[in-house]
Image (tube, grey):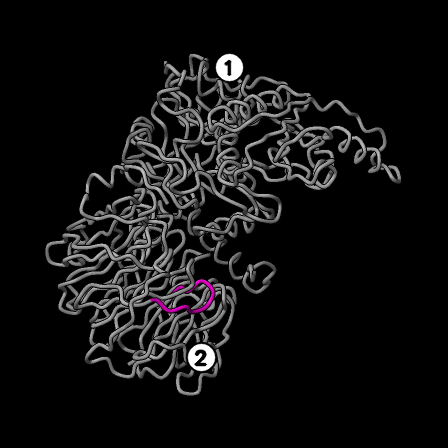
């Protein structure tokens, strides 16, 4: 595809590449990485209504499990034996036994659950109900909605502080990160970020929350103590129109040295120095890259690519894309079971 | 597939939560902000014209078309307003058919309204915009697609959230060129709007280097469509009408849907139909569910009990533009909101993937245009990376700055 000069190109002359080209043709084979244990990679397929299960070492698809309608957010239970699945169009959370791969009785979710987060207590799920401007709190053991918190229009991202005290929810059309006190279940602060915020990711030390903005194409780094944006990270990829740069998935290493940001239809994952906020590199992955997940020792990062129906595998130490694997129809969420 | 329609339990829940939200608003939200919120009053001005049903009589125009979009926009603005301490109110004014639009407008201004969304045709809109009382008011044109409103007849107190005919025609031609279907056969209906639509198509044909191989007026008056075998005469007429021309696409200019729907499958050669029928360039369409559009479709259907139309969408955009500017500029003063909205930092999410903003040269909101029929979204223009632009690919649709004939005053 011929490319003409764009503003982005002059900004970053050392990078090149046809932005619309998928990374399907990556012919690189994966050299077995040291330290990768027999993990399982789980991917939700939004249009395929299924969960793809892959072997974390061979990256072979082990099985595809049919689940409810429009599965998006997925989260592991604390004992890692159960996968919770937001079946958005079935208005419930499904529970998948990860040893038998059978569905157990579903949990209530409130209407149109898109994403959720497991509280560090392991007992509660916090669900973003996209259609009804609510965050629902699900008591897992009692199988009931234990509380509802009104938030902005189209709640999306859910992030819970490592100490469990603070819940951050983003609302896409309101463009805010809402900080909720877990004890009082009240919204205590609202941080206006760029248009259409998606993920809210806490750093492992609980000192920052990183919020991606899809339409704004940026990441706001928020200090949870002052509720102020301490830095805003912008992105520019050579040959890619600025409108196609849409920040969605965010993954931070536990040592807070590196951050990875999925840039949606730009088909790139940005590698960011999480200390200086400098963008170090853009990695070409599959089409419309959405969500990200590390393996246990953070040597690999998996990306879901919604249009090319595959996942890309990033070698984290070498910052290289090493493989892509076809999964189901419109992959959305990804988690790794140790 | 799997669209969440007809789930009774869920609808009931949603309705309940919506009701609860409304009650919370009515009672003054008990959360966070103690002081009464600062209010923004947005006017909505329309004529009480009884609109005629299109010929096939399948989709009679809803009585609340347009204003239903503005009402949802207010609800969305207020959900955000709970967190910013801002409140939004819609002041609806209906002028009687053929009656005094100016009086209805003056009444709004008298109530302190400075931001008015209009669902008016070009002539009454221009008349209102020229009133002395309109000098301190900004009008959001959410209904009139006329190109001269963005050119010779443009005004400094007018913003347009409805796409111009030029934008629609450019969006269609971008698609035809991408498909390598450059030979256009244009069929033009009898109304002034049809001729204006045809003019926009011809301009787009020239702009993108396509080819106008034929242009014919549609004059046939089918006598008895509803009588048994009435379709024979129409099909025979369409076949005859389209015979003897070598073309790729039949482009129909028929804004009132008087005949366009009869063209498909009846042409002499097997050729697709596009324009106001068949594959339609439009700001909003029922099959659109990308970029989170499902959420807006759901919210609208829940509130209005019907599907959102492009006219509803234009009104929703106008009200949301005010709400977005209020949240970002942290102000409820109309002058500050308008200054922010016209500025470079303004970005509105419109469920089309890219942020929407206003063109400084003619007040038109830039936006991607959908290409859809009644059942499927076929494409979205501009197709990424295909028609390049120095600043924004969205400015490949409609009148770009260098060609604009608008001198704002």
Secondary structure of the residue carrying numbered label 1:
helix
* Closest to the observer, A164 or B58: B58
Q: Quadrant of residue B194?
A: top right
Spatial CA span between label 2 and label 1: 67 Å
**Residue appearing at x 27%, y 52% in the figure:** A190
Q: Is residue B233 left or right of residue A60?
A: right
Does the magenta portion include B11? no
* Closest to the observer, B270 or B51: B270
Would you name the residue on which mark 1 appears?
B127
Q: Quadrant of residue A77?
A: bottom left
Q: Chain of mark 1?
A: B
Classify B158 as above or below B58.
Answer: above
Indicate the position of residue A323 as horizontal and vertical percent values: 31, 68
Segment colored magenta: A324-332
Classify B402 as above or below A289.
Answer: above
Q: Is residue B36 visible?
A: no
**Quadrant of the image for the N terminus of chain A?**
top left
User: For the residues tagged 2 and 1, is the chain the same?
Assistant: no
**Residue appearing at x 35%, y 42% in the figure:** A2
Q: Residue A63 got which mark? A: 2
């Amino acid at each position: 595809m011929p490319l003409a000069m764009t503003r982005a190109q002059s900004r970053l002359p050392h990078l090149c590449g046809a932005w619309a080209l998928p990374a399907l043709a990556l012919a690189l084979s994966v050299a077995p990485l040291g330290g990768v244990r027999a993990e399982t990679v789980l991917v939700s397929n939004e249009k395929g209504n299924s969960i793809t299960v892959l072997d974390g070492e061979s990256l072979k698809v082990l099985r595809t499990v049919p689940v409810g309608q429009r599965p998006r957010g997925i989260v592991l239970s604390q004992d890692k034996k159960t996968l919770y699945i937001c079946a958005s169009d079935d208005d419930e959370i499904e529970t998948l036994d990860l040893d038998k791969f059978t569905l157990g009785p579903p949990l209530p979710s409130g209407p149109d659950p898109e994403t959720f987060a497991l509280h560090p207590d392991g007992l509660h799920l916090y669900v973003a109900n996209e259609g009804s401007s609510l965050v629902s709190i699900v008591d897992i053991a009692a199988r009931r909605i234990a509380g509802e918190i009104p938030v902005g229009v189209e709640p999306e991202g859910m992030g819970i502080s490592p100490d469990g005290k603070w819940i951050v929810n983003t609302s896409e059309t309101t463009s805010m990160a809402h900080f909720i006190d877990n004890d009082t279940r009240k919204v205590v602060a609202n941080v206006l970020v760029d248009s259409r915020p998606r993920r809210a990711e806490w750093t492992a030390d609980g000192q920052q929350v990183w919020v991606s903005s899809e339409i704004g194409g940026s990441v706001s780094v928020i200090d949870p103590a002052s509720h102020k944006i301490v830095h805003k990270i912008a992105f520019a990829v050579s040959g890619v129109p600025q409108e196609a740069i849409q920040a969605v998935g965010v993954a931070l290493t536990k040592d807070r040295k590196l951050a990875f940001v999925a840039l949606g239809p730009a088909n790139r994952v940005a590698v960011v120095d999480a200390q200086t906020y400098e963008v170090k590199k853009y990695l070409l992955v599959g089409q419309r890259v959405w969500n990200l997940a590390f393996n246990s020792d953070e040597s690999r990062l998996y990306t879901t690519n919604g249009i090319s129906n595959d996942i890309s595998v990033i070698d984290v130490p070498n910052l290289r894309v090493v493989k892509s694997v076809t999964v189901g129809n419109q992959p959305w969420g990804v988690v790794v079971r140790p | 597939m799997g669209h969440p329609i007809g789930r009774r339990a869920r609808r009931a829940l949603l309705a309940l939560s919506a009701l609860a939200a409304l009650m919370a608003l009515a009672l003054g939200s008990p959360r966070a902000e103690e002081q009464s919120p600062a209010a923004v009053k947005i006017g909505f001005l329309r004529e009480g014209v009884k609109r005629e049903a299109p010929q096939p009589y399948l989709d009679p125009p809803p009585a609340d078309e347009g204003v239903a979009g503005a009402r949802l926009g207010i609800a969305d603005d207020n959900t955000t307003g709970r967190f910013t301490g801002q409140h939004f109110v819609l002041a609806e004014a209906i002028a009687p058919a053929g009656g005094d639009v100016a009086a209805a407008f003056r009444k709004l201004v008298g109530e302190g309204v400075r931001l008015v969304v209009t669902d008016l045709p070009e002539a009454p809109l221009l008349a209102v915009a020229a009133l002395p009382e309109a000098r301190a008011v900004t009008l959001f044109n959410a209904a009139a697609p006329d190109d001269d409103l963005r050119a010779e007849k443009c005004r400094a107190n007018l913003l347009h959230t409805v796409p111009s005919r030029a934008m629609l025609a450019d969006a269609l031609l971008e698609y035809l060129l991408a498909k390598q279907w450059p030979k256009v056969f244009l069929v033009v209906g009898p109304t002034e709007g049809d001729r204006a639509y045809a003019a926009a198509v011809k301009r787009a044909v020239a702009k993108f280097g396509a080819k106008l191989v034929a242009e014919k007026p549609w004059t046939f008056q089918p006598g008895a469509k509803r009588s048994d075998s009435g379709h024979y005469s129409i099909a025979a007429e369409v076949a005859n009408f389209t015979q003897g021309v070598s073309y790729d696409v039949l482009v129909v200019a028929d804004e009132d849907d008087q005949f366009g729907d009869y063209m498909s499958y009846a042409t002499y050669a097997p050729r697709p139909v596009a324009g106001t029928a068949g594959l339609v360039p439009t700001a909003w369409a029922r099959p659109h569910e990308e970029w989170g559009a499902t959420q807006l479709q759901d919210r609208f259907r829940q509130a209005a009990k019907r599907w959102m139309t492009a006219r509803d969408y234009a009104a929703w955009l106008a009200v949301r533009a005010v709400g977005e500017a209020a949240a970002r500029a942290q102000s409820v003063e109309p002058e500050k909101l308008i200054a922010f909205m016209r500025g470079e930092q303004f970005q509105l999410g419109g469920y089309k993937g890219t942020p929407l903003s206003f063109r400084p040269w003619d007040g038109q909101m830039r936006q991607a245009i959908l290409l859809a029929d009644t059942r499927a979204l076929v494409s979205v223009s501009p197709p990424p990376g295909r028609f390049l632009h120095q600043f924004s690919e969205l400015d490949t649709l409609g009148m770009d700055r260098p060609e604009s004939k608008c001198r704002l005053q």
